[in-house]
Image (tube, rainbow, N blue to C red):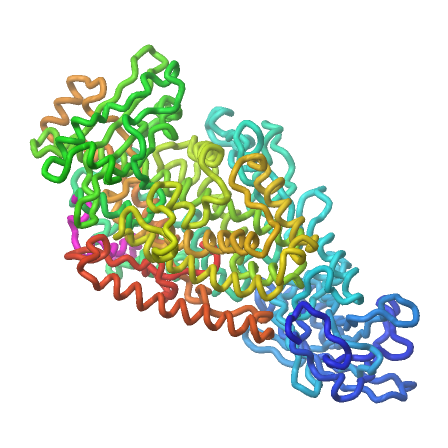
Amino acid sequence: MSKPQHHQSPSASPTLVPSSKPSSQGNGEIAILPVQSSLALQKSPGGAQVGVVSSKITAVASPSAIEKSLSVKVTVTAKPSAGGFFSELGITGGLDKITDLMGKTILLELVSTELDPKTGQEKGTIKGYAHKMSQKEEEVTYECKFEVKEEFGEVGAILVENEHHKEMYLKDIVLDGFVDGPLSIACNSWVHSKHDDPQKRVFFTNKCYLPTETPSGLRRLREEELTILRGNGQGERKSYERIYDYDVYNDLGNPDSDADKSDADKKRPVLGGKELPYPRRCRTGRPRSKNDPQSESRSGSIYVPRDEQFSTIKNLTFSEKTVYSVVHALLPSLETAIIDSNLGFPYFTAIDELFNEGVNLPPLQKQGFLKDAFPRLLKTVTDASQDVLRFETPETMNRDRFFWFSDEEFARQTLAGINPYAIQLVTEWPLRSELDSGIYGPPESAITAEIIEREIKGFMTFNEAIEQKKLFMLDYHDLFLPYVNKVRQLKGTTLYGSRTLFFLTPDETLKPLAIELTRPPTDDGKPQWKQVFTPFCHSTSMWLWRLAKAHVLAHDSGHHQLVSHWLRTHCATEPYIIATNRQLSEMHPIYKLLHPHFRYTMEINALARGYLVNGDGIIETTFSPGKYSMELSAVAYDKQWQFDLQGLPNDLISRGLAVEEPTAPHGLKLAIEDYPFANDGLLLWDTIKEWVTNYVNHYYTNSSHIASDKELQSWWTEIRTVGHGDKKDSPGWPDLKTPSDLIHIITTMVWVASGHHAAVNFGQYTYAGYFPNRPTIARTKMPVEDPTEEELKRFWDKPEGTLLTCFPSQIQATKVMAILDVLSNHSPDEEYLGQNPEPAWKEEPVIKAAFERFSGRLKELEGIIDARNGNQSFKNRNGAGIVPYELLKPLSEPGVTGKGVPYSISI
């Protein structure tokens, strides 16, 4: 069989033949499957794959059967429900034990790929109960035997009914008895109890079929399964359901809360729609808020389709428990220990004590697994029966404790830090705002050519710098400026619009030149205020420069978390996942290709909506924009997000960091040759694209296959017009007419879920664990903005104190450090790019060979990155005290490592 999607003729593929009187799906009897000739009963190369646990089913030939039959033993491997074997206690547990004793735990039905040649109808299924055979600590096996008549044909699917009162996690199903060996069906899915929902589950074989090539006996099941997954858009979703549907972000606030706040402070605007365009999230169907009909009420748990939740396979739901524990146990303990929420750090040595002495916490003995979940953070003081939150020293500080103070390091991190998506080429001069000058004041920047000329004196003239493309910028002016006055009405925070300019030196490092901070006209009549700060050597100018840097770093931290990280990876990917499950059958080759890149993303996004990006959550209470944080990310989506700019090459070109050049590596010439993120990222991008190209071209040999694939076309249409429907008329959506179009679309999605997310996520503790390097909030304005005499005196007498007051408070800093430690952590069973191929990939020789090349390329990439980090000519990734750039190294050991590229956004 050259391609797994092509249905094989009986002569080319082993078939299971139904009895002359096949049992129907509803007659309840256990049928015997007579077997065809030994050749016809061999397992086909594609192998029948079912999404159910491996259970041994034995088919018994009916007494009237006279044809030869094949005895097939089916083994189902299951894992217990989330409650483990303790869930066997109680009434339902007792009933389930009786069910097991009666040998009727799982009802299995074999489904033929063929229609009955006489009637043109589907052949009857062959039924059998699998009975419990063995139980290990985390695994149960069930067996059944079938006698399969030769008329039945090839097995294309298995229907599964869980007779227990509790759900069951099916790992795989293995059918043994075919001449050429066992047929394994990977399930890795939760199967609901029939007492919750009488609908049987269907698990198709591992074979891939394009819609037009679906075997006739499976077409109805293929369509019905998609109908089930789409749901009807009605009612509140139940935890065991697998329904994928869309909704706006109307669950971030909590209008019904009893908290002592005004109604306005409890509400948050709806994200999604004409006013605030936004990607869609998964619909939960929770009732509307009593106090705000536009908002959805909040609850302790947030629905995601059952198979999107962390399974027992993922190491005791590592990510879910750790995030939940930080929010519900560790942070409240911190708030108890640090009573004054506004208390800052009196000295820099007090910050160092977080890594040396730690923070004394109330006893945590009753917090269960908390200390086990955070061995890096929580240390027990044995002689004081007290728990201490003591942070691990980040690798950056381990190598150079003064790293954060350096202007060179400040600039280097724009290229090799955790937000390498913000730096852009200066392409126009003078710099001007595009905002309404009647509202926000004069649009001209205060950064002049004369200021730049003075700062780059000895290198070149200003005009030469512009012509030779040597000036670069972090531009947070127009994005942040409309929110400055709103944010300043909140307690304990402030905001500016900002621009930071850099010069590219001959050794390919960036030199900071100037920072411009702008406040628009205020409601009380003050005019626009703006000032430029440069790194002068005089003490006053130098301390003002350090304060301006703190503000810019807070802006960059907010942009990183809200735009580069949350919006462009987590949030933008959720509609892809929903559409994939609603429109692409599990039999579809593109579903199989995308599946590993979507694991656990919806679950971690739901956790984020519950605890991180929600009203009064971690982000709002610790980042400068405060309650406007998510609204600001919606503005960024509206003004900046385009699908075609999410792929790395187009992203670099759009920021002026690269131009197309066919003869250059990757077809691009970089504006900054020593750009670690771009250099490693383009290697990874090309490796992913090669794998996707080989995969897509195997199934789609020409454009007609793309055009005729109704599932694929519906999938892409739904992503554009529903999941990202608020931007359906915006530029940047590629057509889907050719295999090349599909390759570009899939490569972009895979890159976002793997390389992009890894680059902005797993270095967070390394670079922001010592918060003066990347403060998340600036709490006070610059001392030279409309200063009082008292403010000026404090600054002149002790500028260090002014900087410490501007930094996050003690509770803000420790909250963020604890969260970043968790988010930067790889679980012990992380699934990295190029590892653990999908079962369907392994069973198709062409795809298996392509994946092995993909995996080999990724191993080569590890060595290339190591060599680059050892090359002293690359000053942005090599040097005394500099942390090597490893964020895009594909593999990693568990823990906070600053490297490793998982398949998916799972933390």
Above or below, 491 relative to 617: above
* The one of 238 and 871 positioned closer to us in this rendering: 871
| 668 lies left or right of 350 | right
Residue 762 position in % (x across, y down): 36, 55
Give the residue at the far top of this rendering.
Answer: 525
Q: Give the residue drawn at x 76%, y 81%.
A: 11
Range shown magenta:
384-406
Can residue 102 be seen? no
Query: Is 81 covered by the magenta stretch?
Result: no
Give the residue at the far left of this rendering.
Answer: 538
Give the quadrant of residue 26: bottom right
* The one of 204 and 474 positioned closer to us in this rendering: 474
Q: Give the residue drawn at x 63%, y 40%.
A: 286
Q: Give the residue drawn at x 49%, y 33%.
A: 638
Q: Give the residue drawn at x 34%, y 11%.
A: 524
Above or below, 285 relative to 635: below
Give the residue at the far front of this rendering.
Answer: 663
Above or below, 459 relative to 748: above
Residue 759 position in % (x across, y down): 37, 53
| 902 lies left or right of 148 | left
| 872 lies left or right of 89 | left
Query: Is 405 covered by the magenta stretch?
Result: yes
| 751 lies left or right of 786 | right
Can residue 669 be seen? yes
Above or below, 163 relative to 319: below
Residue 515 position in % (x across, y down): 23, 31
